[in-house]
Image (cartoon, rainbow, N blue to C red):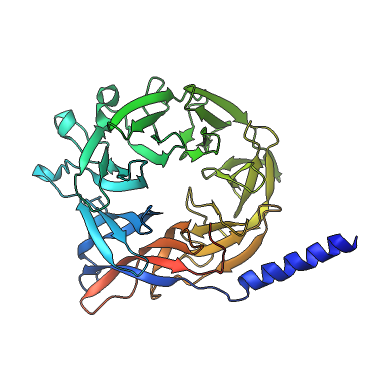
Amino acid sequence: MREKLWFVVLFGLLTASAFAGNPQPAAVYTFACKGGELEIGPCPDGGRPSTLNQGSDGNFYGVATFLSEGSSAPNGGTIFSVTPAGTITLLHEFLPGPNSTFPEGNYPGGLVQGSDGKLYGFTFYGGVGGCNGACGDGVLYRLNTDGSDFQIIHEFCSDGGCGSVYEAASSIVAGTDGNLYGTVYAGGSHGDGFIFRVTPSDGSYRVVANFNFSADEGIPSGLTAAADGSLYAIALSARPSFLVHYTPSTGSMTTVVLNFPVFRGGDSELPSSPVSGLTFGPNGNLYGLYRIYGENGQGLFEVEPNGSKLRLLPFYTTVPGGGDSDGLILASDGNFWMAEITGSNGFGDILTISPYDGSLIQMLTPFSDSAAVGANPLVLIQANDGTLWGTTAADGDTPKGYFGAGVVFSVNAGLPPE
């Protein structure tokens, strides 16, 4: 009993020490656009940074989704690198071609470093060259970390002959076998999307598995790589929901129905459903976020990798809004950290959540339209040295004559190195 009490006291002291400093994000680089109070104008380095990863060289690589502000339509974007000291390098611009067709892609999404050291990513639109101008559902591309040798690997509109089927990519991850894998929202042999593979050695692209959701409502989330080389995903907002397990070594894919419960709200039935991708927890189980229809707030769900023992933890918040769809990370302190795009105040926040009972441990709310770190965080990652890095989608401090269009920020929360 004395040993157990000692452990509880020690754990409490360590937890208090880890969060005693009330860590706050610091702006590393602000994406500035030229313009006045109307916030309309060109963005030399791009605007609205949405993806960030740390490369093998210690620098951070990401994409900004717009070339100028003032239009709701996607208009290009950039690929950039940022050093830990805040020096930015523009690696590539997605420029409009004839009639603004954006032949190299438009509105970049995910970005990841491959086993060959190159950067691989996709765009949601553009790349109409392979479709003779008939469509443009985005491209897969790669380039060197210095921005040289940009290559289009695949144009998604070529899958199934395009037609009216939307086949843009939704994720890309590095597998443990040295290949890259991604998901596509729709299309494929059943029309419910598919998993593709890219082989870095020759840049070849291949569809390796097709989704077939009987409810025809499943949208595959981003893939999560396991230590054994297999990949997991979830069919979001489907009734029923599915846990997807793909094994690259055998090419087999299985789906398991996840029976999210239905709650009673007076005379109404309130179904619950997953609203995020998956993250491995400290116990080896898979975690994600769920909500209940008609109820404010969200919480963690937990499921074993074989799809058994689904468990819904209590809501950690009852405030409307929520986290980024794939923003839950297991940090080196053993807790989940997450950036919420709107959060409790409409400008977003950073949360620390317990994987054991789903409770809220800490909330950081430094974001606003007048804050140096900007507003509406989109992504949060942990660097090798233990610091947290992320991006916001809007605002930030800029010189006179410019306005902020998002920030790369860092947080030193005293976490141990990964």
The answer, for residue 368, to whether it is visible in the render is: no
Image quarter of residue 60? bottom left
**Residue at left offset 56%, top offset 65%:** 415
Is residue 374 rendered to the left or right of residue 216? Answer: left
On the image, the x and y values in percent for residue 304 come to 66, 36
Q: Is residue 239 above or below residue 112?
A: above
The image quadrant that residue 358 belongs to is bottom right
| Quarter of the image where the N terminus is located | bottom right
Q: Is residue 280 above or below residue 200?
A: below
Q: Tell which residue pokes out farthest to the bottom in this image.
A: 400
Q: Give the percent coordinates (x, y) of residue 70.
A: 23, 61
Locate residue 149, reporting x and y percent: 19, 44
**How many labels, in total?**
0
The percent position of residue 140, horizontal first and vertical second, equals 28, 38
Rendered position, 12 above or below 177 = below
Judged from this view, the residue extending furthest toward the right is 1
Confirm whether residue 376 shows in the render. Answer: yes
Who's the residue at 40% across and 40% down the image? 171
Q: Quadrant of residue 14?
A: bottom right
Q: Which residue is found at the position 44% from the left and 62% from the top?
A: 389
Residue 62 is left or right of residue 293, and the answer is: left
Outermost left residue? 98
